[in-house]
Image: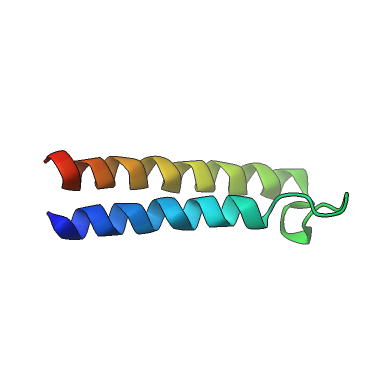
């Protein structure tokens, strides 16, 4: 079960770092999310990875 905890924590860290990297810097939008269609898909993907990571981490801790 320790594998699930580590894997879930890694997913949470990855999603959080991705979100932080894609934030605006100096008033400039990141080129990866400049298009509104791509930006919304990236947001959904990051939130999905974060949610799955939290669930997997808690499964490892309490499962």
Which residue is at 71% across, 44% downward? 37
Q: Residue 36: horizontal and vertical position, in percent? A: 75, 43
Quadrant of image for the C terminus: top left
In this rendering, the answer to whether 63 lies above or below 42 is above
Which residue is at 50% across, 41% downward? 47
Which residue is at 24% across, 41% downward? 58
Q: Nearer the viewer, residue 33 or 15?
A: 15
Q: Residue 40: horizontal and vertical position, in percent? A: 65, 41
Q: Residue 48: horizontal and vertical position, in percent? A: 45, 43
Q: Is residue 17 left or right of residue 52?
A: right
Q: Quadrant of residue 31?
A: bottom right
Q: Quadrant of residue 52?
A: top left
Q: Is residue 27 left or right of residue 57?
A: right
Which residue is at 19% across, 60% downward? 3
Q: Is residue 38 left or right of residue 30?
A: left
Q: Residue 2: horizontal and vertical position, in percent? A: 15, 57
* Extreme-right residue of the structure: 27
Quadrant of image for the N terminus: bottom left
Describe the colour scheme in one phrase: rainbow
The total of numbered circles placed on residues is 0
């Amino acid at each position: 079960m320790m594998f699930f905890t580590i894997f879930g924590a890694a997913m949470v860290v990855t999603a959080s770092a991705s979100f932080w990297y894609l934030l605006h810097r100096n008033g400039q939008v990141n080129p990866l999310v400049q298009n509104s269609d791509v930006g919304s898909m990236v947001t959904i993907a990051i939130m999905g990875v974060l949610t799955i990571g939290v669930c997997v981490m808690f499964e490892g801790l309490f499962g």
